Image (cartoon, rainbow, N blue to C red):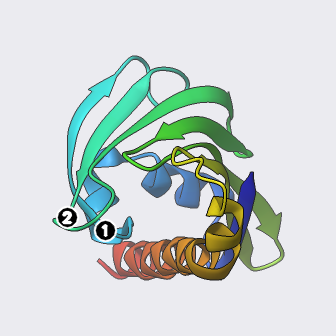
Amino acid sequence: MGRVRAGVDVRALASEAEELWYDTRRWPAFVDGMAHVDNVEGDWPREGRVVWNAKPGGRGRVVERVEAYEARAGQSVAVEDEKVWGTQIVAFEPREHGCRVTLELEYRLKDQKPLMPVVDLLFIRRPMRESLQRTLVRFRRELEVKDII
C-alpha cells in the first residue's frame, strides 16, 4: 500500500478553512483534476458520500465516502476511482497565525500485477503527492481570495 502526504499553512482559522474545504460547490476551483461534482449524498461532511468526475484523461469517476469526521479537526473518507482504492484524510491544525491543512492519501492500486509495487514507487507515488500539493496550493489561494472579497 502506498502513502502520500502534503501540507500547507493558511492565514485563516481552522473553522474558515474547514468551511471552504467541505463546500463541494467550490471543489472544482481547487481540487486537482476535477471537472465537476455529480452528486452529494447524506449529511456531508459528517456522513454520506460525494461522487465527482475528473477532467478528460484524469481519474475518471471518483467516489468519496465519509468514514470519520470531527469538527475543526478533519475528516477521513474512503476513496475509489478507476485505478485506486484508498483512504484520504484532511486535517486542520490551528497555528498562531492561521492553521496548517494536511492532506494524506493511503492507497492500494487496483492493478495487482507482479511489478506494480515497483511501478508505484518509481512512477505513481510522486505524481500523486504533487497532485495533493497542487490541490492545497489552490485551496490556499481560494481561501485568500474569499477573504479579499
Looking at the image, residue 79 sits to the left or right of residue 92; the answer is left
What residue is disc 2 on?
Answer: 55
> Which residue: 66% across, 38% down?
76
Q: Nearer the viewer, residue 33 or 72?
A: 33
Q: Position of residue 12 (x, y in %)?
A: 60, 71
Q: Nearer the viewer, residue 111 or 85?
A: 111
Tag 2 and tag 1, C-beta contact below 8 Å? yes
> Which residue: 55% across, 71% down?
128
Is residue 7 shown to the viewer in this render? yes
Point out the residue furthest to the right here: 96
What residue is disc 1 on?
Answer: 33
Kind of residue at disc 2:
Lys
> Which residue: 73% across, 70% down?
100
Kind of residue at disc 1:
Gly
Looking at the image, residue 80 sits to the left or right of residue 126; the answer is left
Query: Tag 2, which secondary structure?
Result: loop
Query: Tag 1, which secondary structure?
Result: loop
